Image (cartoon, rainbow, N blue to C red):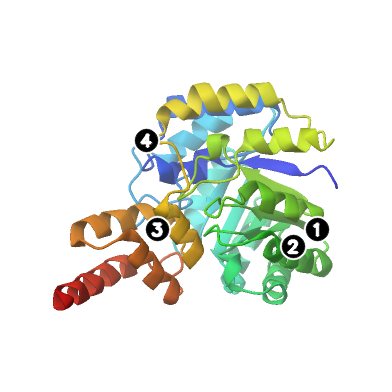
Amino acid sequence: MKIPRITDTTLRDGSHAVSHSFSPELIENVVKRLDEAGVPVIEVSHGAGLHGSTIQQGFSLYSEFDLIKTAVKTAKKAKIASLFVPGIGTSEELRQAVEIGIETIRIAVHCTEADVTEQYFRLAKELGIEAVGFLMMSHTQSGKVLAEQAKLMESYGADCVYVVDSAGALVPVGVKERVSALKEALSIDVGFHAHNNLGLAIGNTLAALEEGADQIDGTLRGLGAGAGNAPTEVLVAVLNKMGIDTDISLSVLMDAAEEVVAPIMPAPIILDRDNLSSGYAGVYNSFLLHVRHAAEKFGVSVSEIMDELGKRQAIAGQEDWILDVAVELAAKKSVRV
């Protein structure tokens, strides 16, 4: 098993869990700790990517470009990365982030929509930065389909393509099938991004590594959308136990998770009924807070909404369905009464 490159995405995926309230001071503290630990890539942006501060995705408390500036200024060795979702971000935001100093852009789309990424991969290469493809909601498609989409990204200039388990819905056999399909089809790196709705974020990441994944993601304390991500400190500890030396300081990561991230968490991230129902139904993790609000407002259960969204195969960008589903379920409940 090769030594993977680890990207810590606490300051992007974790933004969902704190309602996009990261401050410049928090960014500086976390980046300083991760950089000191030797984490090679640190992702910083709104949870939904560049220009994600909207009524639909949730407004940021601070300008994400100010946060990115702080991260770039603080990091001594690590690359600063940002997420970019076509349709949410535009070329203008991508250019601005590069001007500030990001070195990697992670271009994320639903896993059947790679064709909309071409102009952004081309732009990233023109701007001289690393470009990574993110195939979100990868549990919804087979390895064969994902490989076809990944090859499109490769042809546009991607340096790596990720299998992204956005809903935390995959189990190890499914991860292996998808990662191995990409490894066989591509000549570039393959990555894996896990969520923990089924309690498998670490196990699935190890399954990806067994199939040759080159890059993996984690967040301190598992802070992330929904049930959170594979905890970076746990990933490093497990890899150390397996004799895989990432050259990342476990003690610094543990201190950062305990002393910096844990105190800002609204509540511990646990595998409660809501998170499990989201993963089981295969619903995008960033929907969870919106679903909880709708469930409370209309007097229906989170799991009922998740089940219906799963049946409708809701994807990122279809958050408006949440209210529609909640209203329909409440109406049905009223009729039954």
Mark 2 residue element: helix
In three-dimensional space, the C-alpha distance between marks 4 and 2, rounded to whole angstroms, equals: 34 Å
Q: Which mark is residue 7?
A: none
Secondary structure of the residue carrying numbered label 4: loop
Residue indicated by mark 2: 176
Q: What residue is shown with label 3? A: 287
Q: Amino acid at mark 4?
A: Pro
Classify 259 as above or below 241. above
Q: Residues within 10 Å of mark 3 (few under 14, many from 20)?
A: many
Task: Answer few, some or many: residues within 10 Å of disc 1's Cα (few below 14, many 20 plus, some between 14 and 19).
Answer: some
Q: Position of residue 202 (x, y in %)?
A: 66, 46
Left or right side of 251 for 314 = left
Gap between marks 4 and 1 measured at Cα? 36 Å
The disc placed on residue 266 is 4
Q: In 3D space, how far apart are the residues under numbered discs 1 and 2 (Cα atoms)?
A: 6 Å
Q: Which residue is mark 1?
A: 211
Marks 1/3: CA–CA distance? 30 Å
- Real-space CA distance between mark 2 and mark 3, rounded to the nearest whole angstrom: 26 Å
